Each structure stands twice: as structure tokens, then as C-alpha cells.
Image (cartoon, rainbow, N blue to C red):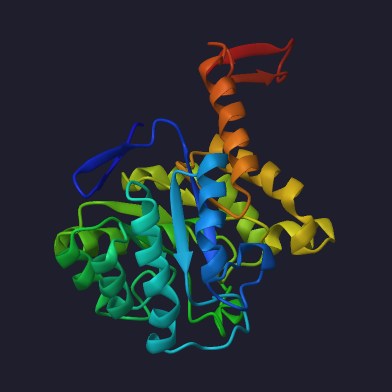
Amino acid sequence: MNLTINIGGRLVETARPLVMGIVNVTPDSFYAGSRADMPGLAARVAGMLSDGADIIDLGGYSTRPGAAEVDAAEELRRLEPAVALLRREFPDIIISVDTWRAEVAERCVGLGADIVNDISGGDMDPAMFGAVARMKVPYILMHTRGTPATMQTMTDYDDVAADVLRDLAFKTDRLRQAGVCDIIVDPGFGFAKTVDQNYALLGALGAFRALGCPLLAGVSRKTMIWKELGVTPDEALNGTTAVNMLALVNGADILRVHDVRQAAETVRIFEAYRRNLHPLHSICVTEAGGPATIDKI
């Protein structure tokens, strides 16, 4: 399914999966390699664009478990000069701002940000849905529960994939009724989910295509990878690449990543695989009642 995102009148297609590069203008994001200060910001983004980034995602508030709370004034102090600098230095790039605050989103869009990426799915600021509708910008709707401080105590689901899909379906309907036309859905890997729940969600990712929205997978160097492998976030690049490929195979349209070159190469390999699929690639081999039979699905 080829979906499009309207970014300021420019239709961006997802026929080829997109790569979103993470840049955090914070001192405490969980992966130090994502952090950038103002003097080095332009060079960092230029490198990401050269490596194949389609979108740059700017964050000014760490949402890792246990991160310090940051008020709106501090978040804006970090984000406003960063958005202004990138819009001036790279006029044509797509900038996403990672914030759950409507006030911060509006100020950053006014400075040139194109997309609002809300990790709370509208739960932490009830003004967010209305603000996005007024601004007429694409909105990344992510699933979580609670706040970054409490989310890992809220992992009790009847069926994690079904429960997350139900929540996102309800919110996409609310957004559409409010007048938001361009919604990107993010099931929220790592947010209020256990390691096993994250993998169950990954396997069910294709079901989220029923929402009719592009799907974003943000798994880069997260606990589901480094804890499973018994390594640190710094050592989780290989595992991230493996999970990114699984996300693409299961229907992801956008990969949100720290390591742009490796993700862009993963997309290229996936595209080569997809365009060369044999007509018999989906088969079911059974041996019940006699010799094996092969049935095309």
C-alpha cells in the first residue's frame, strides 16, 4: 500500500521506506551518540543527510525511564534555536519536532518544523490534537501509557497488539474528526511494554496497516535489543539492524534511528528483496495425511 504524507503541500511517498534520523539537543538522552550541541548541530545533520536521512527528528526532552523532568521554557530554549538553525542551513529538509507539549509544537512549527512527533499520543497535553489540527501538519501518534517516569509499571495487557491497535484506532478517529489529515502511527516500542511484548508487537505490526496510516517503527538501540542480547545500548547497532529489517518485512514505512547510514542500507537491501520476490514466496508446507503438499497463499 503506497501511502503519502502531505508536508506543506509537498506529497512525500512511502513506496520506499523512509529513514528518520534522531538528533537530541539534550544532555541526558539514553544513547549519548544521539546528543548534539548547537556548535556541532549543522555538521551532525549534514552527515545524516549525506548518509540517507529523509527526515530529521529533533528532541529537547529525554523520555527515557527515570529522566529528569524539563519544563516548557527549558524545552523551548533547547529546541527553538535548533529548529531555526536547521531551517536556515537546510531549507528543503523535513524537520520533525519530538514533543508532547502543544505550546512547544506550535512555536517550533512557527519556526519551520514540518511534523509533530508526540510520544504521549495526546495524553500528556489535551491541547495537542486541536493544535495539530490548526497547524495542518502531519502528526506522529505514538502509543504509551503513563509518563516516562511511570510507564514501565503499566505493562499489563490482555493482548498487547490488540490493545495497542484498539487505542490507536480510537485516537486516529478522534484526530480525523478534529480535522487532522496526515497521521503517522507509531506503536511505541519500548514505551510501557516488556521485552517480550515488544517482540509480540513487532510480529503483529502488519495489522496496524488497517488504520490506513504510514507506520513508524522506533526500535533503535532500545531495551528490547540490548537487554535481549546482554549488551549495552552502545553495542546494540547490529541488533538494531536486525530488528529494523523485521520491522520493514512486517510493514514499517518509516524507521526512526540513531544510525542513519546503516538504516538506509537496510532499506536498500529490503527494497532489493521486495522487488525480486518470487511468485511462490508465500507457501505452506504440510504433511498431514500423507506426502507434503505446497499450497500457494
Q: x, y percentage for residue 166?
A: 38, 60
Q: x, y percentage for residue 55?
A: 43, 49
Give the left or right position of residue 258, taking residue 25 as reference. Answer: right
Q: x, y percentage for residue 11?
A: 25, 39
Q: x, y percentage for residue 49?
A: 50, 44
User: 242 or 67, which lies in front?
Assistant: 67
Q: Residue at x 31, y 44 (%)?
A: 212
Tell me: residue 294, above or below residue 243.
above
User: 64 or 169, which lies in front?
Assistant: 64
Q: Residue 27 occupies which quadrant of the picture?
A: bottom right
Q: Residue 104 occupies which quadrant of the picture?
A: bottom left
Q: Residue at x 45, y 78 (%)?
A: 78
User: 286 or 224, which lies in front?
Assistant: 224
Quarter of the picture containing the N terminus is top left
Q: Residue 88 occupies which quadrant of the picture?
A: bottom left
Q: Residue at x 62, y 38 (%)?
A: 245
Q: Residue at x 57, y 63 (%)?
A: 40
Is there any visible trace of residue 157 in the rendered image?
no
